[in-house]
Amino acid sequence: MENFHKKLDKNALAISKKYSGKIAITTIILALLVVLIYPTVLFLFANKFLPPLMTIFFLMGLTFASYIPMHEAVHGNIGGNNSKLKWLDKLIGYTMAPIIAIPFTSHQKEHFTHHKNTNKDDDPDVHIKNLFRSPKDFYKSTIQVIKTQNTFVMNSYTRAEIMLSIGWRISFVVYAGFTSIPVIFLGWFSGAFLTIYLLSYLPHKPYKNSERWKDTNIQLFPIQWFENFIFKQNLHAIHHLFPRVPFYNYRKVFEKIEPSMRIKKTPIVRIFDHKPIKNIIR
C-alpha cells in the first residue's frame, strides 16, 4: 500500500510539472488590468463620475484581484522556471502590494510559513478559523491578520511598503476630500476580507487536519464556470499540493488527479454548505 501511494504521489507530481514552469502570461495580463483599472475607478469617483456604492464594489473586486498576481509572485510562478525573469515576480508582487495593503516583503515569509505549518499551531493564519465564532473573535482575527501580514518580517523594505500603502491613500483623500475616506476604507476592507475568506478560511475549514493531501479542500460550484469569478481559488488544494502550478491551471490539474485525491482522502465538498461530494464531477 505504501508503494501504491508513492506511485500516486509521483504521478501527480509529474502531471503538475506539465502545467507549471512557463511564463504566466495570464497572470501578467491580470496584473496589468488591475494597475490600469484601479486608478481609473478612483479618478472617476473623485470627479463624481462614479457613485460611492459602485466605487466600493469595484474597489472590492480589484483589491481581491490584486492579491492573485501577488500570491503567484510569492511562489515565483510568473517568471516560471526562467531564472532571468525572477525580477518579474518581484515587480508584480511589489506593484500589487500597495493596493491590498499587504507588504510583499513580509508576506513572502509569512505565506511560506503557512504552507510549512498548515493548520498547525505554528501556522500564522490558523487564528482565522475563529473568524465567525463570535463578533469579538471576528474583530480579534481581523486585527491579527493585519498585524501578522504587516509585521511578520519588519525591516526597512516592509516599512517603506507600509508608508507607500498609507501615503497614497492619504494623498487621494486630500485630492478627493474627506468624504472619500469611507469609500477608500470599505473598498479595501471588503476586498481584503473577501481574500481572507476565499483563500484562507474556506479552503482550510474546519482546520482539523495538517496532513498533506488533507489539509486543504476542493470546493465545487453547482455550475463549474462560476469558479472563474474567484480565479479558481475554490480548487485551493491543488495549490497546497503543488504551489508552482499557476491559478489558471488548477482546474486542469484537478481533473487529472481527482481520482488520486479521492484515494488520498482530500476533502472534496460543495462550496456553499461544505457537504462531501462522493461522485466524480466533470
Image (tube, rainbow, N blue to C red):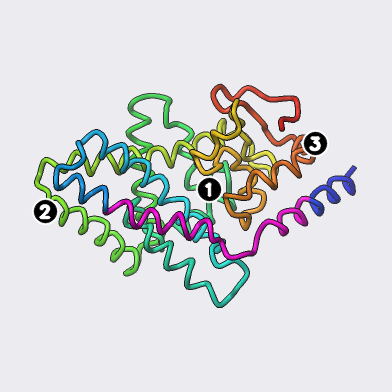
Residue hosting label 1: 122
Which mark's residue is nearer the viewer, 1 or 2?
A: 2
Residue hosting label 2: 175
Would you say the residues marked 1 and 2 are in contact, meaning their CB atoms lie under 8 Å apart?
A: no
Would you say the residues marked 1 and 3 are in contact, meaning their CB atoms lie under 8 Å apart?
A: no
Q: Quadrant of the C terminus?
A: top right
Q: Quadrant of the N terminus?
A: top right
Which mark's residue is nearer the viewer, 1 or 3?
A: 3
Q: CA distance from mark 1 to mark 2?
A: 43 Å
Q: Is residue 114 left or right of residue 97?
A: right
Residue hosting label 3: 263
- x and y percentages locating residue 254 in the rendered image: 69, 43
Q: Amino acid at mark 1?
A: Asp
Q: Secondary structure at mark 1?
A: loop
Segment tinted magenta in the rendering = 12-39
Q: Secondary structure at mark 2?
A: helix
